[in-house]
Amino acid sequence: MLAYTIRRLLMLIPVLIGMSIITFAVVHAIPGDPAKTIAGEKATPQQLEEIRHSLGLDQPFYIQYFRYVGDLLQGDLGTSLITKVPIAEEIGPFLAATAELALTSLVIAVFFGVNLGILSAWRQNSWLDYGSMVLALIGVSVPVFWLGLMEQWFFAQELGWLPSNGRVDPRLDMEGITHFYILDALIIGDMELLGDVLLHLILPAVALATIPMSIIARMTRSSMLEVMRSDYIRTARAKGLSEFWVIYKHAFKNAVIPVLTVAGLQLGMLLGGAVLTETIFSWPGVGRYIYDAINQRNYPVIQSGILVLATMFVIINLIVDLLYAWIDKRIQYGKE
């Protein structure tokens, strides 16, 4: 397991290098001039030239790239052209907001998706099976922005049960210790604050979880149906084990690997694709942070934000691969 882990870690090096090259090249291909963003439209050509020189933009592409990688290796993600604040300091609260939303959505998606898929496989060709799969089909077909707007209209405006936007009631004193608000509320022991944070999470998390939940439900059903036709499942039933024990102890353990793959990929998608949900619910996450940077032509923020998200996606896939090897010892890539 240790050798496998080391091999997988070494494989990250070329991936991260390739990602940095692609990100750097794509951002530099975007039309626009960072010098004009800083100096404004009324800047003289001399002022623009001085700014380009100070930022190193007049250097050849490869020199700019190696300087950028050198800064990255020292933990320097650059400085925002708009706020003049180092991005490494500025991006933390946005990343925490997105991570909190994405992880909550993943928990909802996995819990309901897996159990819906198991129920559907257990009662194959019953009304429960058909109903579950129709529900999953609707879930994967409904646009996130439409579902988010409907949630706001019904649960926030009509019923008044849940807040429609933001992470917390601005009247409450929220102290950003880790910027994971659930964790922060627990650290300071404020249950009223914790309740308010959870209420603010429900609508955006459910909207974001709908598509992954539907995909996980369909994948779980297919995987479970295949496993439940196996001889060892028939043997377990013949021994008189309860149906609950047969499904969750024997069948699900062997059906979980493809589900784990989908869940890992969906978490990566949730982290990078939450911008619509964050916009609808005024959620101050990294998706909105990058979206605003694109509108402002804030190139260092775009470049570093995308690279951070891509790195998180790669790390999530690494964790999923390691979980494969931990769950199923037969999986040892590169081993005869």
Image (cartoon, rainbow, N blue to C red):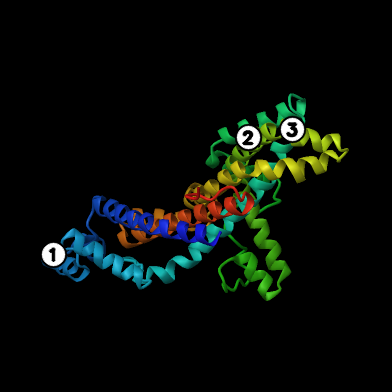
Q: Separation of disc 3 and disc 1 at Cα?
A: 79 Å
Identity of the residue furthest to the top in this view: 125
Horizontal side of 232 relative to 218 (left or right) equals: right
Helix, strand or loop at label 1? It is loop
**Above-or-below relation of 142 to 194:** above
Q: Which residue is the site of mark 3? A: 231
Q: Which residue is the site of mark 1? A: 44
Identity of the residue furthest to the right in this view: 240
- Mark 3–mark 2 contact, CB under 8 Å? no
Query: Which quadrant would the N terminus be assigned to in this image?
Result: bottom right
Q: Which callout, 3 or 2, points at the residue further toward the start of the chain?
A: 2
Three-letter amino acid code at the position of disc 3: Asp
Which of the 4 quarters of the picture holds residue 219?
A: top right
Residue drawn at 66 percent across, 28 percent down: 134
- Mark 3–mark 1 contact, CB under 8 Å? no
Image disc number at residue 218: 2
Horizontal side of 51 relative to 156 (left or right) equals: left
Q: Separation of disc 3 and disc 2 at Cα?
A: 23 Å
**Above-or-below relation of 110 to 135:** below
Three-letter amino acid code at the position of disc 2: Arg
